[in-house]
Amino acid sequence: MLGFDVCTARKVWTASLIALLFFVVYIASTTVLVVVFAVFFSYLIYPMVEFVERVRPRRMPRVASIALVFVVVVAVIAVVGSIFGVQLQDQATHLFAQLPTLLKPDVPSRFPLPHFLEPLRERIIDFVRSQIEIGSDKAVPVARSVGLGVVHAAGNLIHLVLIPILSFLLIKEGPQMRDACLELLTARHRTLWAEIVTDLNVLLSKYVRALLFLSLATLICYGVAFSLLGVPYAFLLAVSAGLLEFVPFAGPLAAVAITLVVAVFSGYPHLLWLVVFIGLYRLFQDYVLNPYLMSEGVEVSPFLVIVGLLAGDQLGGVAGIFLAVPVIATLKIIIGRARVFYATSHAQGDVAHVGWRNTEDPSGPPNLG
């Protein structure tokens, strides 16, 4: 007999709303990405805001202390950019100008190889030469694609201006926005989502600051080591590695590959020492520094990380890879809190039911009510 199940209809309605939410997020991905970066930037700035609020005079309004922090941060970024931006631009311009020379077919014959690989040099040279020829055929389409990407990014510079503005508003109105959203929920679910929001706050703050420290550590260590080892384009490679550190898993691998490719094609003679340094640094960061910084933040299994990175690459490219780990960790928090909440609710309901039953049936077990 056909019938209408209210409980099933409610679940279907909830699932439809969630699917609609994901669809809207996918359609408005650019706007969502700007908001996400604004949230991340807010977590970077907020510790300084807290410090200023602790030492500010009582007559000084909170908005003024937040504005002071943002002015100082923007000024520091401008000064650092003016000091190191020229050197970075010069090295990047020189590298791109030297690309035709570096990609000549006779370059592979100058590759430094270990002694045990010298008998195979000809085969290795033939393989590398063939790869260079294939890469040369694809160089023009890739360059055109990169150029279009640069033009598109230049057209969206307004987003870079919006990120600090949105961050300022988030820090200023964040507590009110949180309380307003929680007031829309029932008292039963308000406690659940308040705990979820608290956990997400800890997660994102630890994750964003850990990424910042990892990026700075990579920038400083790579910059100092590359300069001491005489690696060509040392500052450019160090800055690239520091920026790529924000992309989990894939970013550090890409930084290592770019460094080795530039060093090899530039005829760098101490390639073995460079490989040893990179290997030792990656071991230190992956097994010492990274676990220490992430110990109170993101705890996701490597399997889920790899699957999330692949899915993020398919859905959103570099942005999807960047957001994969925090999204997986967020889902883990929501599912874990919801499971505990509903398990506790069912247990309390069972206890209440048993207590009510025992008041009616004296022959039953002792009353738990």
Image (cartoon, rainbow, N blue to C red):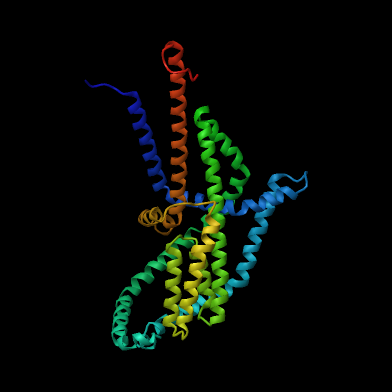
Q: Residue at x 47, y 60 (%)?
A: 155
The one nearer the camera, 341 or 229, is 341
Residue 336 image position (x, y, % from top left):
45, 41
Left or right of residue 220: residue 135: left
Badge count: 0
Is residue 111 positioned above or below 90 on the image?
below
Residue 284 image position (x, y, % from top left):
52, 67
Left or right of residue 228: residue 16: left
Residue 224 image position (x, y, % from top left):
58, 75
Is residue 164 positioned above or below 364 on the image?
below
Query: Residue 130 lies in what quarter of the image?
Result: bottom left
Q: Residue at x 54, y 55 (%)?
A: 208
The one nearer the camera, 115 or 62, is 115
Q: Residue at x 49, y 72 (%)?
A: 280
Quadrant showing the N terminus: top left
Q: Residue at x 60, y 38 (%)?
A: 176
Left or right of residue 236: residue 310: left
